[in-house]
Every structure is written in C-alpha cells, then in structure tokens.
C-alpha cells in the first residue's frame, strides 16, 4: 500500500495532543520528519514514533527526500510563510487553524496552491464530530427548511492559554479568542448553513482580564506561559455576520468572562425546525408535528474517531485515493475575511463590508 510521507513542522502542544496521536493510528501515513525551533521537541517526537529525522529549521524540512506533504502546527504568524514555501516546493500542505493572520496572507496561500496544483487544507475538526455529521444530514434532507439566523460561541470563565506567550501576543497570534476559538464555531455554523458568502461584519472586542491569574479551565495549561510577557489581544469578542442570502449569525468568544461555566455552542433557526447544540447538553431539535411544538433530543452515535484524526484521515484520503476535499481555500479566505473585519469593526465602531 502506498504511504503518504509527511513532515510535521511545530512539535508543541497541538502536535503532541492532537496530530501525533492521530498519525500513530494511521497505517497509510508515515511521519518521516519533525521540526521545531526547540530541537529537543523534534527529537522527542522522533523517539515517540521510533523513526524520522529531527530539524530545527523548517526550510531544511522542505529538502527532505521523498516527502509528499507537510503538516504545520506552528504559531499562527508562520502558517502562510511555511505553507507558501512548501506549495512552491511541490508539496501538499495541511495546516492547523487559523489559515493565516490576515486576508493578504491567506490569498498568498490560495494562489500558491492554485499555481502549484497541490492540495492545501486547513484543520476544520469540528465538522467531523458525530453530532455535526448528523445535523448536516438532517439539514441536507430539508428538515430544517430555510436557515435564516443563528448564534454560535465559545465561552470560558477563566481559561487564557499560554499567558504572556505567543497566544497572547498579537504579532504572533493575530488575535485572542476570536481567532483562536472563533474559527471552530464560525466555520461549523457556516458549513451547516450551506456556506453562504459573508458580506458584512460588526463587532466589539474587550481586554479586561490581562492582569488576572485566576484559572478554572484546563485550557489555561495549554501553550507556553511567559512570565511578564505580552498580552495585547482581546479576551472577549462579540458581533454579528450578515450573509449574501439574507441570513445572519451572532457570535461570541471569550477566554475570560464572568459567565456561569465554559461552553461552546451552535444554534440555528430554520423555517421548519431549529437546532441547538452545546458542549454541555448535546443536540436538541425544535420542530412541530400534528399542531404541536415538539422537542427532539437525538442520539447521534458515539464518537469512534476523534475529530482531529478524522480530518487528517480525510487529508490522506484526498491525496492517496482522490477523495473530494471537504475544505477549499476559498472557505479559508472567507473565514479570515470575517475575523479581520471583526477586528476592524471593533476599532472603527461600525459595520465593515467585505469585498
């Protein structure tokens, strides 16, 4: 069986917690190289897999013999630079979210993929949750009717990752919970809504907990903490997206906020039914039958494959077996356009139109 030879660039928390466990289960992928600016991390990955070469400079990785693709798990700032260079070198690219830190950089990635003819895919793991696939089928069968409005968000009470490190440094991350958590739920909502095109965004951002060391979330342990480091990103973002079909989506994302508890959610409202899925209560559907309103709590099945693994398996299926990509660079461009417009709207105090 043909195997896909992959190099992982960035061997920090995301790689160790999500990508490495997935690759260790995949028979059709061989991870042949590992790269991290802290070379010891790459060396630890070589030991974990029992094979491969450790690199400290990603540019050297692109010269690794018989390489098919790279998987980027670096801080956000470097996603586009590495992706463009790899695509231009004739390699396929899988990248952790967010796609890039700006529309300009995202456009460079899209152009490099088109010019090289190689596959560019960015992590959209929440599409692979069993609840997501169930709800997608429910909608595709017409049971929701026209989806005209929705809400989505990810609230944390006190769960700031890597305080003082790259997560909270805008020059490296591009922003706070909006770009960190927003990609997940905004993408899932838009995908379920049928991928309408965003046309306008309005929003507000706040930074109120930069000096607080209180934590009630395991997410505070994620990322590399730096004492007396930089914290120049928001800890709360709220806003609304309008689409070309007249639909709208309210959004809310926080690392720290005085709310009851941590929760992520997607709520959609259709002409035939509505849905609400939260991390704490599961999926509920709201419809009507025989002249009465009816609430349904479906069991969408056990999550047999973790969503990050499922997304990486799909990438391998696209390259090895010609499967149709579930993600396109245009979707990534729309996503980064939304996030960039949100930050701009917060600065201006008014709605921002998307070109």
Image (cartoon, rainbow, N blue to C red):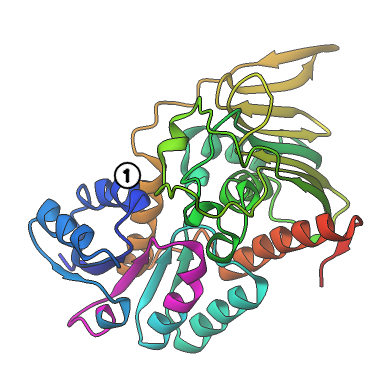
Q: Does residue 324 appear in the picture of this structure?
A: yes
Residue at the left extreme?
Answer: 50
Apparent side of residue 306 relative to residue 112 in the rendered image (left or right): left
Q: Quadrant of the C terminus?
A: bottom right
| Residue beneath the point at 55% across and 27% down | 279
Give the tally of numbered discs. Answer: 1
Apparent side of residue 224 relative to residue 7 in the rendered image (left or right): right
Region of the chain picked out in magenta, as a range: 61-83
Label 1 Cα crowd, 10 Å radius (few <14 / some 14-19 / many 20+): few
Residue 326's place in the image compared with 270, above or below, is below
Apparent side of residue 139 relative to residue 85 in the rendered image (left or right): right
Secondary structure at numbered mark 1: helix
Residue 124 is inside the magenta segment: no
Residue at the front extreme?
Answer: 228
Residue in front for this viewpoint, 256 or 335 = 256
Residue in front for this viewpoint, 38 or 259 = 38
Task: Please name the residue that numbered disc 1 is placed on.
Answer: 17
Q: Quadrant of the N terminus?
A: bottom left
Instruction: Report x, y in % for residue 214.
Output: 53, 28
| Residue beneath the point at 80% across and 30% down | 272
Instruction: Report x, y in % for residue 31.
Output: 20, 63
Instruction: Report x, y in % for residue 56.
Output: 25, 72
Residue 277's place in the image compared with 115, above or below, is above
| Residue beneath the point at 36% across and 55% down | 312
Res 340 → quadrant: bottom right
Q: Does residue 200 appear in the picture of this structure?
A: no
Residue 294's place in the image compared with 190, above or below, is above
| Residue beneath the point at 70% across and 58% down | 339
Residue 64 is inside the magenta segment: yes
Instruction: Report x, y in % for residue 240.
Output: 82, 47
Apparent side of residue 181 relative to residue 23 in the rendered image (left or right): right
């Amino acid at each position: 069986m043909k195997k896909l030879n992959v190099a992982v660039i960035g061997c920090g928390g995301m790689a160790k917690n999500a990508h490495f466990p997935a690759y260790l289960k995949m028979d059709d992928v061989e991870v042949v190289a590992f790269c991290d600016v802290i070379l010891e991390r790459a060396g630890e990955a070589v030991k974990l897999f029992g094979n491969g070469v450790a690199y400290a400079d990603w540019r050297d990785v692109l010269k690794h013999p018989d390489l098919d693709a790279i998987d980027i798990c670096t801080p956000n700032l470097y996603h586009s630079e590495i992706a463009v260079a790899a695509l231009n070198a004739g390699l396929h690219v899988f990248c952790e979210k967010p796609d890039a830190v700006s529309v300009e950089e995202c456009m460079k990635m899209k152009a490099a993929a088109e010019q090289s003819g190689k596959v560019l895919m960015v992590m959209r793991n929440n599409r692979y949750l069993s609840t997501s696939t169930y709800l997608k089928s429910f909608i595709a069968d017409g049971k929701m009717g026209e989806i005209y409005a929705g809400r989505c968000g990810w609230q944390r009470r006190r769960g700031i990752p890597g305080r003082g490190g790259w997560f909270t440094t805008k020059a490296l991350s591009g922003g706070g919970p909006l770009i960190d958590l927003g990609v997940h739920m905004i993408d899932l909502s838009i995908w379920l809504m049928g991928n309408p095109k965003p046309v306008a965004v309005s929003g507000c951002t706040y930074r109120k907990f930069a000096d607080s060391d209180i934590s009630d979330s395991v997410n505070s342990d994620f990322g590399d903490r730096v004492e007396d480091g930089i914290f120049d990103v928001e800890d709360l973002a709220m806003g609304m997206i309008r689409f070309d079909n007249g639909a709208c989506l309210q959004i809310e994302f926080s690392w720290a906020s005085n709310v009851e508890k941590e929760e992520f959610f997607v709520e959609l409202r259709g002409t035939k039914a509505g849905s609400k899925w939260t991390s704490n209560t599961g999926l509920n559907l709201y419809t009507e039958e025989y002249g009465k309103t009816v609430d349904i709590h479906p069991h969408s099945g056990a999550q047999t494959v973790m969503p990050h693994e499922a997304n990486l398996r799909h990438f391998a299926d696209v390259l090895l077996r010609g499967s149709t990509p579930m993600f396109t660079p245009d979707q990534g461009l729309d996503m980064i356009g939304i996030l960039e417009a949100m930050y701009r709207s917060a600065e201006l105090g008014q709605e921002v139109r998307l070109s």
